[in-house]
Image (tube, grey):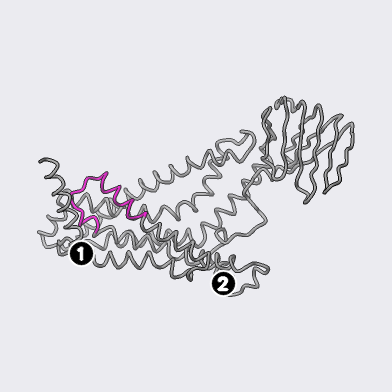
Amino acid sequence: MKLLQRQIFLELLKLFGLTVSCLLGLILVGRMLQLRSLFLSQNIGILNILQLFFFLTPFFLLLITPIATMLSVFLTFLRMSTDNELVALKASGVSLYRMLPAPALFCALCTLFAFFISFWGLAWGMDMFKTKLYYFAKTHSKFALQPGVFNKEFPHITFYAHQVDNEKGQLKFAFVRDDSIKNTSVVVVAPEAEIESTPEQALIHIVFKNGKIFRESGDELNVLKFGRYSIKLDLGKLLVGFNFSEEKAKDMPFFRLNAIRGDHDLMPGQDDRFYRKVDTEFYKRLTLPLGCFVLGMFAIPIASIFRGLRQQYGLLMAMGLFMVYYTMFSIGVSMGESGTIPPQYGMWAPNLLFVLVASVGMRYANLERTPSVIHRLRHLRLSRGKRGEA
């Protein structure tokens, strides 16, 4: 039995490492283009990109650890079932319940790992990601324009130039519109301009020469001529969508979420929706790691019941079952944040449902019986196959 448990545990570890590596690699590669598009020029080195990805890893690991746990257990027991190893073990007097210690220990370790990420790793990673991202934007980015294209990378500011030389920083027939002031629009037009970028100070100076300023406020329009006019911009504003001054619930440590739930005065001036997000995120940090254990144990009877499936079909089926779980989980998050239902109901519902199905399925798998629904589906498939041959 010790040898059996050890072999099962080692196979689970190998599949878990392979699954996590593949899923994490796919996600990070997909994020690469999105991350680099935050900058106007390509001065960010590959080492800096990898460093940013490293800080994003805890966020992705919290999402992929449950599915990696489920796939590892499912594929292991599906292979054992397909190779008739389960039949041989049961013929030797080893019941399914006696095989559970290894997968149970594996699922428990994955759950503890997910809890560590949920409680500490996620907040640390997001804090470091934002800090490094802002630093790289300030110290590595330059302001680059495309000729004949309206550039709106900076919030409330539109740039245009008919001719652009980004190497020398020279613009011909330049135009800029500033709508950052409420009810006021400022337009600067000049036949030539220069870009002076100082990343070490996180500033950009656009110097217009021999142009005009059109200032419109309500029904009033003022026109001014100038010989030299400079606009100063903050490179940090290139990070559209990243508000570093706003503290979001999803970026907070778990224990701060718990403290805010008990005392709203810790975050004064927030609306009810914010506190609902805090409650939802609190239960999310609890239920998602527990999903590793629930989904892992759920995969055992499913793999036993659907014995004989090929690996690729089994993988697709496992992914489909996980999508059911994650869809229920996402609906619970949305309904909890909107106040439709209390957050704890929506967060715990997927785990409770899958625990119930796993308990019933484990009993059927140990007795080597197939639920009537599965039996009917198989019978329907065989009937269709015979009709097709006829």
Q: Residue 378: percent from the left, percent from the top?
A: 17, 53
Q: Quadrant of residue 312?
A: top left
> What amino acid type should be assigned to the residue bearing mark 1?
Arg
Give the residues in magenta: 302-323
Q: Nearer the viewer, mark 1 or mark 2?
A: 2
Q: Quadrant of the N terminus?
A: bottom left
Q: Residues within 10 Å of mark 2 (few under 14, many from 20)?
A: some
| Image location (x, y in percent) of residue 224 | 89, 37
Q: What residue do we see at 55% from left, 40% from top?
A: 49
Give the residue displayed 55% in from the left and 64% down from the top. 277
Name the side, left or right, on which 283 lies relative to 161. left
Task: Name which residue lies at 79% across and 41% down.
Answer: 232
Q: CA distance from mark 1 to mark 2?
A: 43 Å
Q: Disc 2 on helix, strand or loop?
A: helix
Tell which residue pokes out farthest to the bottom in this image.
262
Q: Chief secondary structure of the magenta span?
A: helix
Q: Secondary structure at mark 1?
A: helix
- Decide whether residue 51 is among the magenta residues: no
Q: In the drawing, does residue 252 fall left or right of residue 154?
A: left
Label 2 sits on residue: 261
Q: Between 6 and 274, which is closer to the camera in this rendering?
A: 274
Closest to the observer: 137 or 147?
147
Q: Position of residue 371 (x, y in %)?
A: 19, 62
What numbered label is drawn on residue 98? 1
Image quarter in which the C terminus is found? top left
Q: Is residue 312 magenta?
A: yes
The amino acid sitting under disc 2 is Arg
How packed mark 1 is, by other alpha carbons closer than 10 Å (few <14, some 14-19, many 20 or more), is few
| First reached walking from the N terminus: tag 1 or tag 2 | 1
